[in-house]
Image: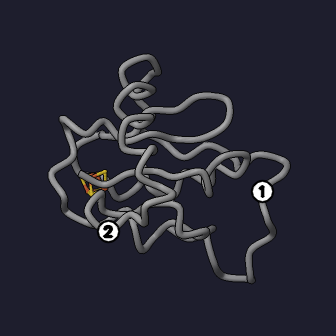
Amino acid sequence: PYVVTDLCSGCRYTECVTVCPVECFHVDERMTYIDPDNCIDCGGCAPICPVGAIQADFLLPADKQAWIGINRERAALTPVLTQRLPPLPGAPALPQGAGGGG
Ligand code: SF4
């Protein structure tokens, strides 16, 4: 499955939920998480994340592999998110035209 990493934390642009065909995404007050049992590895979410927070599990560098377990644990404890939310106040500004589309 795909995995949301710490780059999402405090940012949470939630572009990912607009492309996921199977409602994988869960959310808390800081970031999103992917339910690994629902993810069908379509790959749609990774390129659309404006901060590059999402990666296939087998491509994660060693220092990000803890996020595989964190996504599984947090997805089980948090509600499904199916619509975009406003980014968090601390989210980095994006170049014009990025992130706001679809
Ligand atoms: Fe959803 Fe596809 Fe991303 Fe998996 S890879 S979380 S199915 S958009």
**Residue 67 image position (x, y, % from top left):** 45, 45
Decide if residue 34 is on the left or right side of residue 12.
Answer: left
Seen as rendered, the residue at the extreme left is 40
Question: Dividing the picture into quarters, in which one does residue 24 lie?
Answer: top left
Above or below: residue 15 compared with residue 12 = below
Tell me the element at label 1: loop
Q: Which residue is mark 2?
A: 59
Residue located at (48% from left, 55% from top):
64
Above or below: residue 60 compared with residue 9 = below
| Three-letter code for the amino acid on which mark 2 is drawn | Leu
Seen as rendered, the residue at the extreme top is 77
Q: Which residue is mark 1?
A: 91
Seen as rendered, the residue at the extreme bottom is 96
Decide if residue 23 is on the left or right side of residue 28.
Answer: left
Seen as rendered, the residue at the extreme right is 89
Residue located at (69% from left, 47% from top):
86
Residue located at (19% from left, 38% from top):
38
Q: Are marks 2 and 1 in contact (CB under 8 Å)?
A: no
Which badge, 2 or 1, comes first in the chain's sequence? 2
Nearest to viewer (mark 2 / mark 1):
2
Question: Dividing the picture into quarters, in which one does residue 46 lie?
Answer: bottom left
Decide if residue 78 is on the left or right side of residue 87.
Answer: left
| Three-letter code for the amino acid on which mark 1 is drawn | Ala
Q: Quadrant of ligand 1?
A: bottom left
Q: Which of the colour schemes (rainbow, by chain, secondary structure, one colour) is used?
A: one colour
Residue located at (15% from left, 51% from top):
40
**Residue 87 image position (x, y, % from top left):** 71, 50
